[in-house]
Image (spheres, grey):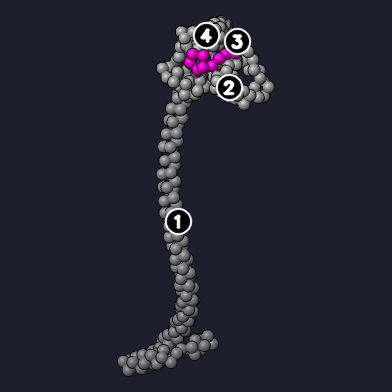
Amino acid sequence: MQTAKNTVSKITPGIKKEIIKIIDERIREVHVTREDFRELKEIVRDLGIKTAELADAQKRTEQRVEELAEAQKRTEQRVEELAEAQKRTEQRVEELAEAQKKSEERLTRVEIALDELAQAQKRTEQRVEELAEAQKKSEERLTRVEIALDELAQAQKRTEEAITTLTKEHSITRKLVEDLSNTEGYRLEDEAFKALPRLFAENYGIDVKDRLKRTYLKDKRGRDIEVNIFGKGIKGNNTVTIIGESKSQLSKNDVDRFIDRKLRLFKDLFEDIFPVLVTYMISEPDVEDYAKDKGIALFYSYDF
């Protein structure tokens, strides 16, 4: 009973008003007996109980609604957090996508570079093969060259041996020629010794004293120098020194050597040197004029 009173006390004024209104309408509509009134009281009591239950349910509903609202708030907060996280995730995904794009571009470049390197390697290997083949051919040629060089070395050895033999023979031949030349030179000089005094007198007015001879004279440095024709003569009131040389075939070089190797060596040792050359023949047409221009008397063997 106490519970019913507590429940009735919890009825809101609005609900009470509606209950009274319903009761008044029922009283007006029907004639109420005691029994009906008792039933009405039961109904009212039941309505109060149900109303209290509804109020409790309403309170629980409101409490649940508040809990749901709080949960909704937390859910919305979590959703916002998830949305922010999703945003960061999407941003990270974009960054990763951009990085992936760059990685793919780099990978593409690397693949291109690798392909170029592969092509270069292929060309290098081909070039190496060509060089190996060329090397092989070079080695074959080198082998042939080595064989040829060995043959040339053998031929050179034989040539050197032949040259050595020829040199020896040439030395012998040259000695024979020199001996022959000396013999001819001596013969020419011997003839000149006889004929020159007359020729000097007829052509240059020189009177040869004593006899002409083959001898050695010391130069300014005290060296003994061979002179083929040497003698003294008188020209007018002066004494001249006759210095001469014989050549089988006289050339301009012979004239120059005679000046350098004989006349210049005795230039300051003798006064009034009279230079003379005798020969069988000259090597060039202008040798005679060349000798005369140098102040040298020239006689041929046929002048004797």
SS of the residue at dot 3? strand
Q: Label 2 belongs to which residue?
A: 238
Q: Which residues are magenta?
A: 201-209
Asked whether residue 2 is drawn in magenta, I would say no
Q: Are marks 3 and 2 in contact (CB under 8 Å)?
A: no
Nearest to the observer: residue 185 or residue 134: 185
Identity, as a three-letter code, of the amino acid under mark 3 = Arg
Q: Label 3 belongs to which residue?
A: 211
SS of the residue at dot 2? strand
Nearest to the observer: residue 129 or residue 207: 207
Q: Are marks 4 and 3 in contact (CB under 8 Å)?
A: no
Q: Which numbered disc, 1 or 3, marks the residue closer to the eye?
A: 3
Q: Are marks 2 and 1 in contact (CB under 8 Å)?
A: no
SS of the residue at dot 4? helix
Where's residue 163, x and y in %? 54, 10
Label drawn at residue 90: none
**Could you tell me which residue is drawn at 44 percent across and 84 percent down?**
51
Mark 4 or mark 1, earlier in chain = 1
Identity, as a three-letter code, of the amino acid under mark 2 = Asn
Residue 195 drawn above or below residue 76? above
Q: CA distance from mark 4 to mark 1?
A: 122 Å
Where's residue 115, x and y in %? 42, 40
Q: Label 1 belongs to which residue?
A: 99
Identity, as a three-letter code, of the amino acid under mark 1 = Ala
**Could you tell me which residue is drawn at 48 percent across and 88 percent down?**
10
Q: Label 4 belongs to which residue?
A: 195
Q: Which numbered disc, 4 or 2, marks the residue closer to the eye?
A: 2
